Image (cartoon, rainbow, N blue to C red):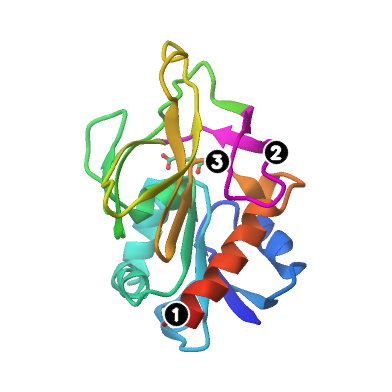
Amino acid sequence: PLRIGVLALQGAFAEHQHVLARLPGVESTVQVRTAAAIEDPTLDALVLPGGESTTMALIAERSGLMDPLRAFVKSGKPVWGTCAGMILLSNTAHATKAGGQNLIGGLAVTVKRNAFGAQVDSFVADLSIPTLINPETPFPGVFIRAPIIESVDEKEVEVLARVPRKGEENSEGSIVAVRQGHILATAFHPELTEDDRFHRYFVDMAHQVIKQK
Ligand code: GLN
């Protein structure tokens, strides 16, 4: 059974813990706030929650966590970023305002922050996600000032879900969930729904990744 860390600097970390703690295959969850906690060899996997990516990166920098977080991702241990967490895992991020942002990186995608515009700060969309259990039941995607994935390195990254955007109804839709080997990323917030299929997917994925190591 897994010991799963949730980065607990800011944002929706407790909600992830609640869902993970009751799933089979999870031994315990732990709030991670220090380099020592990230470097703890008994930590099997890590979740980077949603919140505000600039703030989270700033706190992580001040606490000396950016390099330990990068090392964790490079180590090949399973990682999942939701929303702001997804932004931090991306290799490149475009903000709506000018100004750079320090990222953890590792995920070969370019994200656009706050991509749904101010009028639709938050919404729920039914997502079709073939890789989940009972895929015929749509997954409720909770989007809160959410980013989208603008482009992916197709050799590395598997697209798991898309959502139509205003003015783009005829296109395939914007990418909102991806997997790159041991890295999972979602633009939406599965921890804010009753549907735990995405958390189950991460736990299964983590078991697979660890077995292959
Ligand atoms: N808008 C936030 C950001 O850019 C992300 C929002 C979220 O995590 N729900 O970091």
Q: Is residue 195 magenta?
A: no
Q: Is residue 205 above or below residue 97?
A: below
Which percent across, then down, holds residue 213?
A: 41, 82
Q: Nearer the viewer, residue 102 or 209?
A: 209
**Residue lying farthest to the top in this orientation:** 167
CB-based contact (under 8 Å), mark 3 and mark 2: no
Amino acid marked by disc 3: Phe
Q: 208 or 142: which is nearer to us?
A: 208
Q: Which mark is residue 188?
A: 3
Numbered label attached to residue 212: 1
Find out whether residue 126 is within the magenta segment.
yes
Q: Quick one: SS at disc 2? A: loop
Q: Is residue 20 above or below residue 83?
A: below
x%, y% of residue 28?
68, 78
**Which amino acid does the dot numbered 1 rest on?**
Gln
The residue lying toward the viewer, choosing from 111 and 171, is 171
Q: Which residue is mark 2?
A: 136
Please state the extent of the stretch shown in magenta in the rendering. Answer: 124-147
Which residue lies at the image location 36% right of the left edge and 55% below the top edge?
89
Question: Going from the N terminus, do you reach mark 3 or mark 2 first?
Answer: 2
Q: Position of residue 98 (x, y in %)?
A: 22, 32
Q: Give the CA separation, mark 1 to mark 2.
A: 29 Å
- For label 3, the SS is loop
**Closer to the eye: label 3 or 1:** 1
Mark 1 lies on a secondary structure that is helix
Please name the residue shown 60% across and 35% down the image. Answer: 128
Q: Residues within 10 Å of mark 2 (few under 14, many from 20)?
A: few
Residue 32 visible in the current orientation: no
Image coordinates of residue 57 in percent, x first then y, are 36, 56
Q: CA distance from mark 3 to mark 2?
A: 19 Å
In the image: residue 82, left or right of residue 132: left
